Image: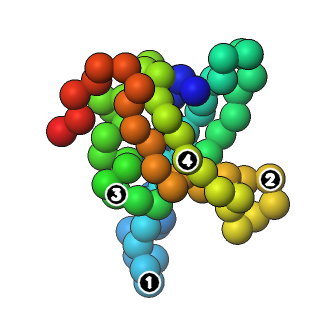
Amino acid sequence: ATLTGFKIVQSKPDAPKPWTAWFCTFEDAGGAQFEAGTFSKTIGENLDVLKGSLVQLTYKPGKKAGTFEICSIEPVDNVPMP
């Protein structure tokens, strides 16, 4: 799949347990788009480098019906990872 974009969502600053989530948009070889998210800071920090690249994506069903959680995302192209 190609990582076509992502958005960052953060909890309110006064939340008891502050969090940051990254919601990514992907496009598969057939042109279908889908979204998957992650709370992983490690994954989230590498999304800028991977945007627009072909990636190997592993995901699982999210806690809410119809959502997907990213388990891992790796570049397929020759994209250097920090």
Q: Which residue is mark 1?
A: 16
Q: Contact, CB < 8 Å: mark 4 with mark 2?
A: no
Q: Is residue 18 left or right of residue 79?
A: right
Q: Earlier in the sequence, mark 3 or mark 2?
A: 3
Q: Quadrant of residue 26?
A: top right
Badge 1, how many Cα within 10 Å: few under 14, some, many 20+?
few
Tell whether 82 sits left or right of 57: left
What separation in Å lies between label 4 and label 3 (alpha carbons)?
16 Å
Q: CA distance from mark 1 to mark 4?
A: 30 Å
**Residue receiving disc 4:** 58
Between discs 1 and 3, the one toward the N terminus: 1
Q: Amino acid at mark 3?
A: Lys
Regarding residue 37, the answer to whether it shows in the image is: no
Image: 16 above or below 6: below
Q: Position of residue 27 (x, y in %)?
A: 63, 23
Tag 3's secondary structure? helix
Tell me: residue 39, above or below residue 45.
below
